[in-house]
């Protein structure tokens, strides 16, 4: 064992004991990192890299239809570069304790009133708040060639009740990536809706591609409905329909993202609006997640297709906007910045802000008691045309 490893273990043990932190801090430093400080898992056809920072997926390599290896997600070259990221979660990180917007920080469980910490002027809470899971350095409980498990000891981060323990396991099998997000409530019931952000560009920004996802196609077979939002993107509690052949029709056919987002009001040059909407996943009852994918994203250019199977009942789909969160392409993706519409994310989660909509009668999906275990399961299946 190298001297530097021993020093790292000692420091981790002290940190763990001192802060009453994770008993896995010692183990974390024992698992091998690559030269970019990332953890690699791989199986036939796919190789993924993760960082401790928000448990973010920072690379996903796959060979395209020409046999060229592409890195088809956004990320940073060095694992710790993501900490300068202003967004929540850290780019491609896990999202918890509650994904999406909560319209205000106050809520009641069993007639006990709780208030979540928020420093946003409008008092909303987004993706678990600024100190949520996606902006924490996680620990690794286990790592093998094709699997990694992060553990989360949530000590009431962001002002959520209780001190639940969470587990995030990523496993790869040939051309497949499975993700499970688990939580047990400790002491008191808690609102929960976990997710993982992944911004995809299935061309890996190859030099001959458009470097955007406007020519990717998207199908959301079970998403004839979406959630209405106010001007700030906060769900109002109303549900809208996505009529056939409308801009939101991703259910009846594979729709080119550029066609859906083209803004008809501009005559002079092509203009697009951003997609930033949460779609319902409404499967005929009873359903199993294996019955069919909730989303299919494909690019003709690279021939790569990803199908998302999930037990979650909504998907937040948003296109990349190069704003204050602007990032560079990774070394393997080329030069320059990720442009507007450079990527798209599909975040599986519970219905957004269901904490404030008891009329939806989704208490079971929204509040986790101490009498059971929360589980969010998803599988991404890859194929090459
Ligand atoms: C891509 O193909 C090459 C050559 O066959 C292989 O060595 C490599 O492992 C493949 N990449 C992935 C991610 O499977």
Image (cartoon, rainbow, N blue to C red):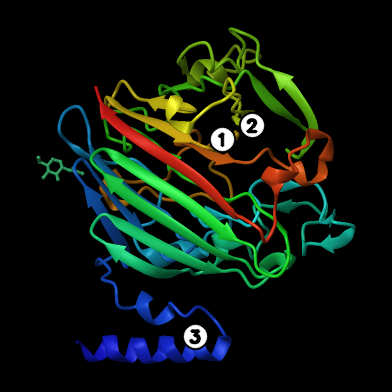
- Which residue: 48% across, 11% down? 253
Q: Nearer the viewer, mark 2 or mark 3?
A: 3
Q: Secondary structure at mark 2?
A: strand
Q: Nearer the viewer, mark 3 or mark 1?
A: 3
Residue 288 drawn at (x, y percent): 49, 30
Cβ–Cβ under 8 Å for marks 3 and 1: no
Mark number, residue 18: none
Please give the residue where the numbered disc 1 appears in the rendered image. 318
Nearest the eye: 112 or 324: 112
Please give the residue where the numbered disc 3 appears in the rendered image. 16
Q: CA distance from mark 1 to mark 2?
A: 6 Å
- Which residue: 35% across, 87% down? 9
Disc 1 crowd rating (10 Å Cα; few below 14, some 14-19, many 20+) is some
Please give the residue where the numbered disc 2 appears in the rendered image. 277
**Residue 88 picture quarter:** bottom right
Q: Is residue 362 visible?
A: yes
Residue 67 drawn at (x, y percent): 15, 33
Disc 2 crowd rating (10 Å Cα; few below 14, some 14-19, many 20+) is some
Quadrant of the snapshot with the C terminus: top left
Figure quadrant, ligand 1:
top left
Q: Judge: label 3 CB < 8 Å from ligand 1.
A: no
Q: Residue furthest top?
A: 245
Vertical position of residue 208 compared to residue 248: above or below: below
Left of 206 or right of it: where is 222? right
Q: Earlier in the sequence, mark 2 or mark 3?
A: 3
Q: CA distance from mark 3 to mark 1?
A: 37 Å
Left of 241 or right of it: where is 19? left
Cβ–Cβ under 8 Å for marks 1 and 2: yes
**Residue 10 picture quarter:** bottom left
Q: Secondary structure at mark 1?
A: strand
């Amino acid at each position: 064992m190298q001297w530097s490893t021993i020093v790292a273990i000692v420091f981790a043990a002290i940190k763990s004991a001192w802060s009453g932190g994770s008993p896995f801090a010692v183990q974390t430093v024992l698992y091998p990192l690559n030269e970019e400080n990332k953890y690699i898992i791989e199986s036939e056809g796919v190789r993924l890299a993760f960082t401790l920072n928000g448990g973010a997926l920072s690379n996903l390599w796959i060979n395209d239809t020409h046999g060229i290896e592409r890195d088809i997600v956004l990320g940073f070259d060095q694992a710790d570069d993501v900490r300068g990221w202003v967004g929540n979660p850290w780019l491609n990180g896990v999202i918890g304790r509650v994904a999406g917007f909560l319209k205000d920080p106050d809520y009641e469980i069993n007639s006990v009133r709780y208030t979540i910490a928020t420093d946003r002027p409008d008092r909303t809470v987004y993706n678990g708040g600024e100190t949520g899971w996606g902006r924490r350095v996680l620990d690794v409980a286990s790592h093998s060639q094709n699997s990694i498990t992060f553990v989360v000891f949530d000590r009431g981060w962001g002002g959520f009740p209780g001190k639940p323990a969470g587990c995030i396991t990523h496993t790869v099998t040939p051309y497949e990536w499975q993700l499970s997000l688990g939580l047990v409530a400790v002491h008191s019931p808690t609102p929960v809706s976990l997710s993982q952000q992944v911004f995809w560009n299935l061309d890996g920004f190859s030099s001959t591609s458009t470097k955007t996802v406007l020519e990717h196609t998207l199908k959301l077979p079970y998403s004839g409905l979406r959630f209405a939002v106010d001007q700030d993107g906060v769900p109002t509690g109303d549900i809208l329909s996505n009529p056939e052949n409308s801009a939101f029709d991703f259910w009846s056919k594979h729709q080119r993202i550029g066609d859906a987002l083209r803004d008809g009001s501009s005559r002079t040059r092509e203009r697009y609006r951003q997609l930033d909407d949460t779609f319902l996943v409404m499967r005929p009852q009873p359903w199993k997640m294996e019955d069919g994918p909730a989303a299919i994203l494909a690019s003709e250019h690279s021939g790569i297709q990803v199908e998302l199977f999930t037990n979650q009942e909504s998907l937040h789909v948003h296109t990349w906007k190069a704003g204050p969160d602007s990032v560079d392409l990774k070394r393997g993706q080329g030069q320059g910045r990720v442009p507007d519409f450079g990527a798209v994310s599909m975040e599986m989660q519970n219905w957004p802000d269901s904490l404030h909509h008891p009329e939806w009668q989704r208490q079971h999906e929204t509040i986790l008691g101490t009498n059971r275990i929360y589980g969010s399961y998803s599988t991404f299946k890859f194929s090459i045309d």
